[in-house]
Amino acid sequence: MTDTDTKSIGYYLRTHIREYGMVVALVAILAFFQVLTDGIMLKPVNLTNLFLQNSYIIIMAVGMLLVIVGGNIDLSVGSVVGFIGALAAVMIVNWDLPTAFVIPVCLIAGAIIGAAQGYWVAYWRIPSFIVTLAGMLVFKGLTLALLGGASVGPFPDGFQAMSSGFIPDFFGGLIEGRFNLFSMSLGVALAAILPILGLRARAKQAKFAAVEEPMAVFVTKHAVAGLAILFVTYLLSTYRGLPNILVIMALLIAIFTFITNSTTLGRRIYALGGNEKAAKLSGINTKRLTFFTFANMGMLAALAGLVFAARLNTATPKAGLAFELDVIAAVFIGGASMSGGVGKVIGAVVGALIMGVMNNGMSIIGVGIDWQQVIKGLVLLAAVIFDVYNKNKA
Amino acid sequence: MDTILEMKNITKTFPGVKALDDVSLKVERGEIHALCGENGAGKSTLMKVLSGVYPHGTYDGDILYDGGVQEFKDIRDSEDRGIIIIHQELALVPLLSIAENIFLGNEVSENGVVNWPATFARTGELLQKVGLKENPATLVTNIGVGKQQLVEIAKALSKKVKLLILDEPTASLQENDSQKLLDLLLEFKAQGITSILISHKLNEINRVADRITIIRDGKAISTLDARGGTITEDDIVKDMVGRDMAHRYPDRTPNISSEKLMEVRNWSATHPLHPERKVVDNVNIDVAAGEVVGIAGLMGAGRTELAMSIFGQSYGTDISGEVLLRGKPIDVSTVEKAIASGLAYVTEDRKEMGLILEESITTNITLANLPGVSENGVLNEGAERSVAEEYRGKINIRTPNVAQKVMNLSGGNQQKVVLSKWLFAAPEVLILDEPTRGIDVGAKYEIYTIINQLAADGKGVIMISSEMPELLGMCDRIYVMNEGEIKGQLAAKDASQEAIMRMILKA
């Protein structure tokens, strides 16, 4: 019994090596910099910064994952970030429009930008590389035009709170000092809910067929994830609590993980990227799906644009420059395949975090921007080589 | 006569399939040696072993060629020794000129600089040898398949060929192009070039071949000497087929409804790129519940195009006509609607158009009917697994686990996954396009059993196949299609290979 058990665990881990390998790599890189930076890496203030600095990359990586799984690419997202930031600045600062009105308008504008590009890709079969390369130039130019070449700012407090605010401590009176008990409670609740949801999913699955994931893997996975959540929320709670943007990100990750793993929409996107002809002949509306992935990407790029502008507290013509490269790199480090059909939301998030931790860690220990680029490039290459090697071995 | 080639005890195994089992082949210098056998018998595999596509070490056995044991590492290696193979799927680059294609990888050049005048001059000579009157600068995409075939042969000649291998060279050629090609082979023979000809067309083989080796189920069955003129097509067929027809197809008692289940009326479609070419021309066909209807025809007859244009306009433009189910017109303008109306189309090209190879068996089986395993757009993974397990049992998909990726399955099992996908979509009419292409004999029998079961369950089955014995063994009725038109139909009792061929050739 034990023998077959360990065998199946070994088999399961071997077939899922990529998913767990990335998490292990992230933890190893964190530990590496924790030592090298004399513990600065995991200081609450640095950890908070890490999330704030990388929030917009993670937000876009989630959308980019869908685009890449669908077999396309979007090079325009960096320019869209800049353009939407500029649009928000012009509307709020120059025209005095209320923030609560501007935010939805900007998100819709982003969706329209994405849809406009997706239209050519999906219905005219123009290669996405070309359409979005054009989009990249167009929106970079429009950003400049909109801002008249100058920075526009500052934003009102309400707008800034989106990226630099924190969840207020509703239990504020209950404890001395700065410890944010409400944030900690959120973390505890999340750590408790995840295994319960996991167990329910297993029970549901077991009703129909044997559960694929061995129990030992399930327990280990949730124990590690739970401890990590508790650890991170504890650290953040000792500083200022959970950043607003972290909550937004967590929600996005949860929603898109659900879409990709558990809905027919998600399954169809994987099918589209895996084999477009077969998907089409199976009755899947591949054009509409491609269109959707781009519209969705546009909206998330707009959100990232708002977050980034709020963080800088100004819209500059240079905002978003080369962001698309970081986003695409994150998705590929996270295990997505260039040819489509393969990739996980959580992988893209972990990929973005690996890039973020490396940026942050190398900056702290004083590695110059020159060598940072070199090292990041090599990490991207190594991650993809690892993928290809694994695939060929299988 | 000396022997130019001797392949000794060649065995080649793929995961799950023994493609070649202890095959020996002897070819004499200067002869035209024909290789016969059904699809999937192992002819092409044997030639790939010979030409180094499967390099030395991936097979067992020895190749003796031109006086010594050869251990080819790749095609280039065998080409250097004068063995040139022309594959069924032509290996030409469509957007390069004839001259560029002929000297591709073998350019007339000095220090890497191409000598264009010499290239064109030599191309002109080669084209003359093969009797092709085309400008060497013409792009390959602009000439017909028959002429492309000749370009391939010219390319072979440019490489100082000693042993020319042609894999079904006439499969996609018109009659007169085929004749020209065969004449060319005889001419080469006169010049001392040895040829191996793989073909299904027994009359062609009888016309040009000196000796015939017959391969069946990965084994060399016999080598017949055709020079005396005493070999008949029946002799060849007997060895090709081996056992009785009765045992190759499962027994079935047809229970055919008297009413038509599906009717296609006045169906036409044109080529998507050449609007003047009618690929499907005013076709009328029907199928009853419980009936297996075949569509016979040569490659390029328009059978796949007919099926795909019916199935959600997946092929062609300018599609016109009507599809009726139980007498009522149905909307088949998109694949989604065609499936919803009760149609299913099992593609001839399962890897390119039927399966997502990187995904699991489960994912592939549920793909055409995701609503069947979901609620409000949310998938029920457990229900998916149980559906997959159900079909694994029912259709006998051989796999340790339904989470297995489809690319790791053998051809036969992949085909069963495609069939499962469409069975789960619960259609009333299934169009099966070459349902047994490229799978071994045992798996074929299982597929036939499934088809019979479908008919017994009251489905209408339309079966497109290029293997006439298969159509004769399986169908209640056979339509014969050529050049986009239905040329006629034959009841099972009147049908024979000859009758079908006659109908095809009837202008």
Image: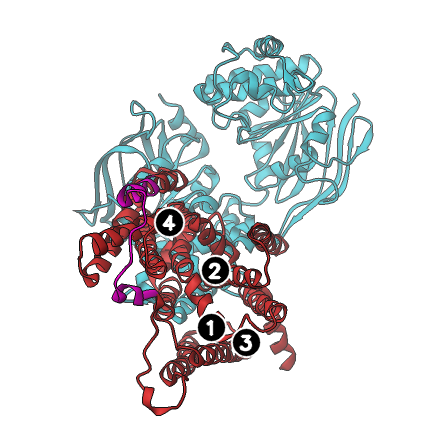
Chain colours: A red, B cyan
Question: In this image, A379 relative to A283: left or right?
Answer: right
Tell me if label 2 and label 1 are in contact, CB under 8 Å.
Answer: no
- Tell me the CA gap for discs 3 and 1: 33 Å
Callout 3, which amino acid? Answer: Val
Q: Identify the chain of the residue marked 1, using the numbered disc in the image.
A: A
The answer for how far apart the CA atoms under marks 2 and 3 are is 24 Å
Q: Which residue is mark 3?
A: A217
Dividing the image into 4 quarters, which one contains the C terminus of chain A? bottom right
- x and y, in percent, of residue B444 in the image: 51, 50
* Separation of marks 4 and 3 at Cα, in angstroms: 37 Å
Amino acid beneath label 4: Val
Q: Earlier in the sequence, mark 4 or mark 1?
A: 1
Q: Which mark is residue A352?
A: 2
Which of the two discs, 2 and 3, labels the residue nearer the N terminus?
A: 3
Q: Which residue is mark 1?
A: A45
Where residue B269 appears, as percent x and y from the top left, is: 28, 32
**Quick one: B139 or B324, which is closer to the camera?**
B139
Mark 4 and mark 1 residues within 8 Å of each other at the beta carbon: no
The chief SS type of the magenta part is helix
Residue B224 picture quarter: top right
State which mark lies toward you, 2 or 3: 2
Range of magenta residues: A138-163
Residue B195: which quarter of the image? top right
Q: The numbered mark 4 sits on a residue in which chain? A: A
**Among numbered discs 4 and 2, the one appearing first in the sequence:** 4
Q: In this rendering, is residue A143 above or below B391? A: above
Establish if B349 lies above or below B500: below
